[in-house]
Image (cartoon, rainbow, N blue to C red):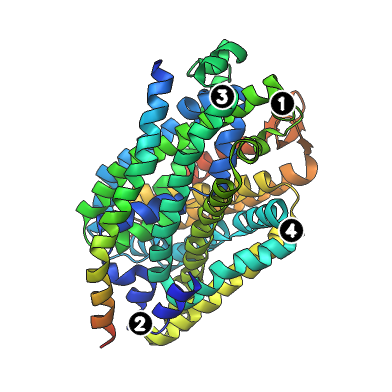
Amino acid sequence: MSNWELFTWISVIILGPGSILVFILFLRDLPALLRKTNKEIS
Amino acid sequence: MVGVGIWFATRHATFDDFFLAGRSLTTPLLITTLISTYYGIDVLFGDSQLGFTDGVVAWFGYARPTYAFFVIAAFLLAHRLREEDFRSLPDILEKYYGTKTRYVGAVASFIYSLPALSLYGFGMIGEVIMDWPPFLGMLILGGIALVYTLAGGFWAVALTDSIQFVMMCVVLAIATPFALNLIGGFDQMYLFLDPNYFEPMGDLSIWLIIIYASTGLTILVEPTFYQRIFAAKSYKNVRNALIAGIFIWGAYDWIITILAMAAKVGTLQGIIDPSVQPDAALLTIMVTALPAGVLGLFLAGVLSTEMSTLDSYCLVAGGNVAYDVYQPMTKKEVSDKQLINMTRYGIALSWVLGFAMALAFDQMLGLWVFMASILISSVTIPIIFGLYIKRFRKPMAGFLSAGLGLFSTIILNVLVMTKGVFVGEEETYVLQLGQWEIMQEYIMYFTIPISLIGFFIGLLIDKGKYYE
């Protein structure tokens, strides 16, 4: 496997599983963020 | 997405809630909103165009230098910006140079943020997917982004950005094996492509590489980027998001480059129409390689890429109208409710102006160069000097620098676009002056020094005290 190919598959991993991981971390923060908006209007 | 906007419509107690999401963005949300906003279809099709015609230089020469600016932003700029209580880019100009410079900065930021390019992209997408006339795609797809931005403000923008982020990244990851499989893998690339395609700096001239690299300067004065720095929970969140973001931006640019090179191989193998335009190469190989369901997902990803860009810029433009111009001009107390409503009018105004420009201009690349050079030429010098050198914070210096930068950019762009000719091969306007050929992209080589000279003349003229 050439360096170009290796670089490509690493990029695929970052974009695929990597972005899903970031999204899961965001979902973990979401309840606290939404609670904050509810608190602000009350 | 419209639902998210409507849900947030009544949940803004203050202007900070509406415009900066209550300054509470965490690292994951910052990553998603930074990436999805800063990368629109101009990157998707612009990077792929260069990858198709020149190979890996699209990543090494065009994309890579911007990562250096992200590092500077992460460790130097963001830290400095978080030390003070700014809400917008013109806020910085007012603090260091006074209200007049604030207005010039607000005008530059407003022009830069007009969503003409995004709306044009929606017209193109609507035409390709649904066979709609361009104005209908702009109206319907752009209209959806307008509705949720008007209703939900920055909360709606940031939360929809996260969904759009995952869509735009995952579809590229899924599309790569399909595209490589179509052409027979990397071995076929080495076989069909000229060895120059694998030269990191290709055969592009050093001047063009410098121009491409200098486009990264926009990061240092990007209004949507600043807005996210101000909206973060803390500096650490911004720094971590930018460091993580560099890897994702890098991967995204690389995959686009590889897909474009695969498209080139496809044309040489006869799988793809050899007359395909370079900027349509990415879309063409996707249509050829992906099965129907995955293609639908890809097109949804392209839509997401553009929607997340349009909503953010409209919001910034709305803020420029309400917070940066209307509020200081009224000279009386403006309530948060009034400010939010005025921002909504500003959002709608920017959308309408962007729509008119997208219909009126034929050359979107020329329009983009014009808009970007207005921002860079007018605010880069005063912002950077103001942030880091106390003794340079004099009203006349800021005003002359921003004013001359803005004025010279408008004059030179109008001159090149009216007196010059559009050269299809270079995809830009060129003005012939004797033996010199001035490309539209070169204008910043004149306007930034003009802004710099204006700054130092202002420093010499202004004998008053500097701002703390």
Q: Quadrant of residue B466?
A: bottom left
State if disc 3 and disc 2 touch (CB < 8 Å).
no
Q: Residues within 10 Å of mark 2 (few under 14, many from 20)?
A: many
- Of B441 and B257, which appears nearest the observer? B257
Res B185 visible: yes
Q: Earlier in the sequence, mark 3 or mark 4?
A: 4
Circle 1 or circle 2, nearest the eye: 2
As helix, strand or loop, the secondary structure at mark 1 comes to strand
Residue type highlighted by circle 2? Arg
Q: Residue at x 45, y 62 (%)?
A: B101
Q: Earlier in the sequence, mark 2 or mark 4?
A: 2
Q: CA distance from mark 3 to mark 1?
A: 15 Å
Q: Chain of mark 3?
A: B
- In the image, taking residue B229 as reference, residue B167 lies left or right, namely right
Measured along the vertical axis of the image, is residue B209 above or below residue B408? Answer: above
Residue under label 2, please give it: B11
- In the image, taking residue B49 as reference, residue B455 lies left or right, namely left
Residue under label 4, please give it: B134
Residue type highlighted by circle 3? Trp
Circle 3 or circle 1, nearest the eye: 3
Q: CA distance from mark 3 to mark 4?
A: 35 Å
Can you give x and y, in whole percent of width and height, for residue B167 in the image?
45, 52
Q: Which mark is residue B436?
A: 1
Can you give x and y, in whole percent of width and height, for residue B93 in the image?
39, 60
As helix, strand or loop, the secondary structure at mark 3 comes to helix
Q: Earlier in the sequence, mark 3 or mark 1?
A: 3
